Image (cartoon, rainbow, N blue to C red):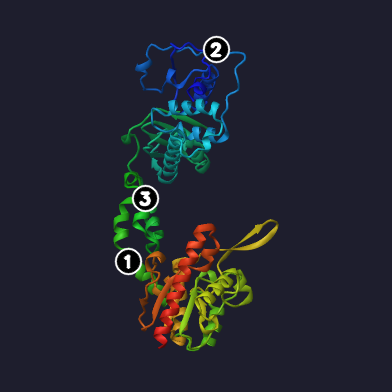
């Protein structure tokens, strides 16, 4: 290994050291050009000091700052596409050792071109981590930069928007194109401790680092933005842990809507209850009471336009099964096959459900099978020259609206057990969102004395492959077996 890495050292003196001063901390092209020459001159990694602006190269202060001359018979440098892609991102990291790390990896690639495929290699893993951190920092910048309108002394130049952001890495210039494309018609500046960008609507310029006090603290538009954020804040989809992971608190100080978040979280439960109540009352005035026959429900849902799904070009799909079934099986919504056939669970997910029901010893013909949402929600799309209707998940408000119908079906059928398949179906029965992994396998008492059992939707199994599908199929079978056993108990 040592012999391969030293590569002969025929073009460099063993006592030679080189110091490479990079003009910019994020200058990948400069690093690549210098690294190529050094590799071709067979200069090993431990003979080079890479110094970024503001950094020190004391260890090699006596080194030669003149680059060696590439010999005429130098071999081309090997660097596959994966290395180049990772290096472009990793070099934006704030780790001062990144240039040396990348050169060491490039040096080793000359002897082992497949090294980037070695997931256990320490250098490869380190570069992947650097690149991942840079991508995450860029994502946060895209999401959390907030422009504020400032007073301009040059009235003829129009409005000027300024944002303050504190990136962890050298990502400012790398993301200039994103903001230029997204806010091409605005005159804006982004100020950071690492530099600044200025866009005048036609050209981009760079400026020196700035301080937080250089940026405005707010503007009149922020009240409007806060009102909009509060309006779109959906308490039914609130997951505090996931929100804090996606929106770390360190960014909150620059986000005007952040001041609302504690209050919105505190009031989420009451707002969700109000949404459910609104879903119940949306039919007020049209029906004095729910239809008292399955036939009446079937007729009514075909005329229902209480949510946007009903207004699509589709047909309502009524539940089917015995009027006095002990088991009610509830899915999410009809799919394309069900919409065309006018029957629940006749597509691929229905066929898979039938297989698992047979395995559990449950006769589908003895159960009442229906959906939490009565219409097929989709978006039209042209795929490979043909038109298709692509499934869309119903929103919480749409599920809550359709509770009117599922409760009407339950009141007539009066099942002893209800099996909800999928989170949407569970919400249609409970009026709140639950985690399937936390509630599956355990009966949930309902207000009418029946029991709710929750499991995954068979379409979820269809989207999996390999061991993941086998594991979910095993859990699905276990849930159905538990329902079958409980049916025997309540029937007795």
Tell me which residue sits at (36%, 67%) in the image.
272
**Residue 25 in view:** no
Earlier sequence position, callout 3 versus callout 1: 3
Question: Which sits in the foreground, 91 or 288?
Answer: 91
Examine the image and state in which quarter residue 72 appears. top right
Compared with 217, 369 (above or below) is below
Compared with 138, 455 (above or below) is below
Residue 18 on image: x %, y %: 44, 15
- Local secondary structure at mark 2: loop
Callout 1 environment at 10 Å: few (<14), some (14 to 19), or many (20+)?
Answer: some
Measured Cα–Cα span from mark 3 to mark 1: 21 Å
The image quadrant where one finds the C terminus is bottom left
Callout 2 environment at 10 Å: few (<14), some (14 to 19), or many (20+)?
Answer: few
Label 2 sits on residue:
69
Earlier sequence position, callout 3 versus callout 2: 2
Earlier sequence position, callout 2 versus callout 1: 2
Residue 412 on image: x %, y %: 46, 87
Label 3 sits on residue:
245
Residue 81 on image: x %, y %: 57, 34
Compared with 266, 309 (above or below) is below
Measured Cα–Cα span from mark 2 to mark 1: 70 Å
Question: Which sits in the foreground, 409 or 290?
Answer: 409
Label 1 sits on residue:
269
């Amino acid at each position: 290994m040592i012999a391969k890495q030293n590569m002969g050292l025929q073009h460099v003196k063993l006592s030679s050291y080189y110091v490479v001063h990079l003009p910019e901390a994020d200058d990948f092209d400069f690093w690549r050009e210098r690294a190529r020459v050094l590799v071709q001159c067979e200069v090993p990694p431990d003979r080079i000091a890479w110094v970024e602006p503001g950094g020190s190269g004391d260890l090699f202060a006596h080194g030669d700052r003149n680059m060696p001359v590439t010999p005429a018979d130098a071999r081309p440098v090997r660097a596959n596409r994966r290395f180049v892609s990772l290096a472009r991102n990793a070099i934006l990291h704030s780790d001062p050792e990144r240039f040396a790390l990348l050169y060491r990896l490039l040096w080793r690639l000359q002897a082992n071109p497949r090294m980037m495929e070695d997931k256990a290699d320490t250098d490869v893993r380190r570069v992947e981590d650097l690149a991942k951190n840079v991508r995450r920092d860029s994502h946060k910048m895209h999401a959390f930069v907030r422009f504020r309108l400032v007073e301009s002394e040059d009235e003829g130049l129009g409005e000027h928007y300024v944002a303050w952001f504190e990136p962890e890495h050298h990502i400012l210039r790398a993301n200039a194109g994103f903001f230029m494309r997204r806010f091409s018609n605005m005159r804006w500046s982004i100020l950071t401790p690492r530099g600044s960008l200025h866009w005048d609507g036609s050209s981009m310029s760079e400026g020196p680092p700035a301080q937080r006090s250089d940026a405005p603290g707010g503007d009149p538009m922020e009240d409007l933005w806060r009102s909009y954020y509060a309006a779109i804040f959906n308490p039914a989809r609130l997951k505090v842990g996931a929100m804090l992971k996606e929106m770390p608190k360190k960014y909150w100080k620059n986000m005007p809507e952040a001041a609302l978040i504690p209050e919105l979280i505190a009031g989420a439960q009451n707002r969700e209850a109000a949404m459910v109540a609104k879903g119940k009352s949306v039919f007020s005035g049209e029906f004095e009471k729910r239809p008292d026959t399955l036939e009446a429900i079937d007729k009514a849902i075909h005329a229902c336009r209480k949510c946007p799904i009903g207004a699509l070009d589709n047909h309502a799909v009524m539940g089917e099964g015995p009027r006095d079934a002990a088991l009610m099986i509830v899915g999410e919504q009809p799919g394309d096959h069900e919409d065309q056939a006018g029957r629940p669970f006749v597509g691929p997910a229905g066929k898979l459900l039938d297989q698992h029901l047979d395995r559990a010893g449950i006769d589908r013909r003895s159960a009442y099978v229906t959906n939490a949402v009565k219409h097929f929600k989709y978006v039209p799309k042209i795929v490979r020259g043909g038109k298709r209707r692509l499934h869309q998940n119903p929103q919480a408000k749409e599920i809550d609206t359709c509770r009117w119908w599922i409760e009407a079906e339950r009141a007539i059928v009066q099942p002893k057990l209800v099996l909800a398949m999928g989170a949407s179906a569970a919400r249609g029965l409970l009026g709140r969102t639950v985690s399937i992994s936390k509630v599956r396998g355990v009966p949930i008492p309902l207000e009418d004395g029946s029991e709710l059992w929750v499991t995954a939707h068979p379409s979820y199994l269809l989207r999996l492959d390999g061991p993941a599908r086998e594991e979910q199929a095993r859990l699905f079978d276990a849930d159905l077996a538990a329902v079958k056993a409980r049916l025997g108990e309540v029937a007795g």
